[in-house]
Image (cartoon, rainbow, N blue to C red):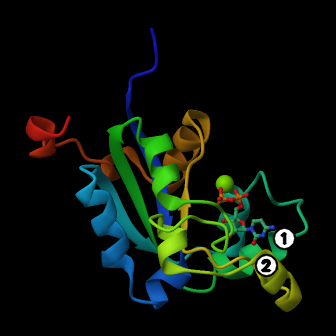
Amino acid sequence: MPESLIQRTLVLLKPDAVQRGIMGNLITRFENAGLKIVGMKMVWVDDAFSKKHYSAHVEKPFYKGLEEFITFGPLVALAIEGIEAIETIRKMVGSTEPKKALPGTIRGDFAHHSYPYADKKGIAIKNLIHASDSIESANKELNLWFTSEELHTYKTVHELHVF
Ligand code: CDP
Ligand code: MG
C-alpha cells in the first residue's frame, strides 16, 4: 500500500513566537493555505522532554543552546493535516537560519537571526518554529507530543473547495 498523500505533521510555535505575540499570525498562514489543525495545546517543556524531542541533536555542539531556547517559556504544539503536509509546511517554514530563509516563508518574514550572531552570543538560532522533516519523524513526534484522544478528525470546508 502506498503512503497516503494526506499527512499529519507536528509544528511547534517556539517560545520566541509565543513571547513575541505572533502565534495567531503564524497559525493564520496554515489556515489560509487550507491546512487543517487537528491538535493544539500550550506546553512548557522541561530538559528531559527536550532531549526526547531533539534526540537526533543531543550530541551536537548547538544542543545546549537549543535546550535553553526550547525550555525558555511555553510553546504551542500543533498537529496539522493536509495534502503532502510535511513537505508543504517545511516549505512554508523556510530555512533553519532566518537570515537565509526566503521572504514569504515564516522564518524569512518574521525573523532575521544568523548563525554567526547566535554563535557569538552562545545561543540557539532564534527561528520561531519547528516542523517535522519526514514521514518517520512526523509519526514519532506526533506520538511524543499528542495522545490519540488529543488528535481530532472532522471536516472543514476546504475538503469541499480546496482538496
Ligand atoms: O528546525 P530545523 O529542522 O530547520 O533545523 P535542525 O537542523 O533540525 O535544528 C533544530 C533546531 O536547532 C533549529 O531549528 C535551531 O533552533 C537549532 N539550531 C541551532 O541553534 N544552531 C544550529 N547550528 C543548528 C540548529
Ligand atoms: Mg529538524
Amino acid type indicated by mark 1: Phe
The total number of labels drawn is 2
Label 2 residue SS: helix
| Quadrant in the picture for the C terminus | top left
Q: Is mark 2 within 8 Å of ligand 1?
A: yes
Query: Camera-side residue: 52 or 114?
Result: 114
Q: Residue at x 79, y 83 (%)?
A: 118
Q: Residue at x 28, y 67 (%)?
A: 28
Q: Residue at x 52, y 51 (%)?
A: 90
Q: Which residue is mark 2?
A: 65
In the image, residue 42 lies at what x, y percent? 41, 74
Q: Which residue is mark 1?
A: 62
In the image, residue 162 lies at what x, y percent? 17, 40
In the rendered view, tell whether residue 61 sits above or below residue 161: below
Q: Is mark 1 within 8 Å of ligand 1?
A: yes
Determine the image quadrant of residue 123: bottom right
Query: Camera-side residue: 42 or 135?
Result: 135
